[in-house]
Image: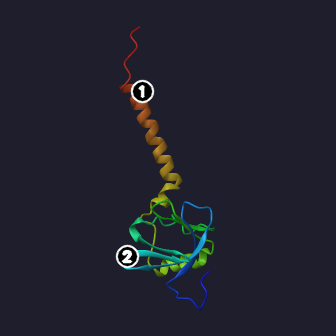
Amino acid sequence: MNTPHTDPTRLTVDYHDGRSDQAQAVSIWVSQGMLELAGHGILRQVPIHHVQWPDHPEEPGVRIVTLPGGGTLRASDRLAWDAWQAQQNLAPAASFGKNRQSWRWSLTATLMLLAICAASYVFALPTNRG
């Protein structure tokens, strides 16, 4: 992906525009709050705050970034991606991704839902005076 002869602030990734099936190799970099993409016939700027960064950088596999309008960037070299993302000081918007997969949060939400259902059954349903 990123060779020693290229600018270390740029990374080569696959760009899917969301309209065609073909991926195109593009270079990406950050400049003045914009994520910039450049490739053969492609020149695009996206505000950094509109980009959805990968939620779980600790997971192995392809890094997929979602762009507004349905496009995606895919980096198959996760080590190069993680190094580039760290160098650019880019991260997911919040730690919601970790909380989303926490068993404690899931258990708490399930217990709260059961408590609401039980309270609704006891206090909200009319009594049967048949």
Q: In the displayed orientation, state which residue is furthest to the top.
A: 130
Figure check: 98 above or below 11? above
**Closer to us: 109 or 38:** 38
Q: Amino acid at mark 2?
A: Gly
Identify the residue position indicated by label 2 in the image. Answer: 33
Figure check: 74 above or below 5? above
x and y percentages locating residue 85 in the rendered image? 50, 76
**Closer to us: 22 or 123:** 22
**Closer to us: 130 or 8:** 8
Q: Amino acid at mark 1?
A: Tyr
Figure check: 114 above or below 44? above
x and y percentages locating residue 61 in the rendered image? 63, 67
Residue at the spot 40% in from the left edge and 75% down from the top edge:
34
Q: Which mark is residue 79?
A: none
Which quarter of the rendered picture does the N terminus lie within?
bottom right
Give the Cα distance between marks 1 and 2.
Answer: 52 Å
Identify the residue position indicated by label 1 in the image. Answer: 121
Q: In the displayed orientation, state which residue is furthest to the bottom.
A: 5
Residue at the spot 45% in from the left edge and 39% down from the top edge:
113
Residue at the spot 39% in from the left edge and 26% down from the top edge:
122
For disc 2, the neighbor class at 10 Å (few under 14, some 14 to 19, many from 20) is few
**Closer to us: 111 or 89:** 89
